[in-house]
Image: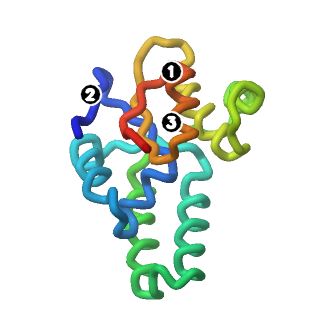
Amino acid sequence: MNIPEIETGLYFWDSSAILPLLVKEDNSEFILNIYKKHPSLIVWWACEIECVSALARLEREQKINSGHMASAMHRLKLLKEHWHEVLPNDIVKELAKRMLRVHTLRAADAQQLAAADFLTERKTWDVGFVCLDKKLNEAAQKEGIVTICEVN
């Protein structure tokens, strides 16, 4: 699959796309290729919390063991040292509230989409949206945000 090129080189990463960088998943190779090509991650402020939540769930469900968990947490720490976070602010909050009324999204997904939209709100540059959640990708497309991953 070809990775759409964004002229600005800016890519907003949803937590669902960070997880395959931390633990082996079916789409890890594809996501790793995007990361290698565009290693500057932009995420929303709670991305780390969502990733830890997903990893803890995998560990509780015994899909990863404690060694894999420790490795994944270390990789997350390394990623976090270099990513850029969109912090909550009044504009992002208003965008998220609008997203909840317009799209069938959960609160956290609306906040992530609002953070990505905040980066393009003035429409002065494009930002690619790296996400593995079908519903969130569909909402992003309706908002005019370029999605990078095709999700079935």
The answer to which image quadrant residue 103 occupies is top right
Residue that extends furthest to the front in the rendered view of this protein: 152
Q: On the picture, is 113 further left or further right than 132?
A: right
Q: Residues within 10 Å of mark 3 (few under 14, many from 20)?
A: many
Image: 50 above or below 62: above
The residue tagged 2 is 5
Tally of numbered tags: 3
Q: Do the residues labelled 3 and 1 touch (CB within 8 Å)?
A: no
Quadrant where the C terminus is found in the figure: top left
Q: On the picture, is 139 further left or further right than 81?
A: right
Quadrant where the N terminus is found in the figure: top left
- The kind of residue tagged 3 is Asn
Image position, residue 84 (x, y; %): 46, 43
The residue tagged 3 is 137
Q: What mark, if any, has residue 120 been given in the picture?
A: 1
Image position, residue 79 (x, y; %): 39, 58
Residue at 27% across, 54% down: 32
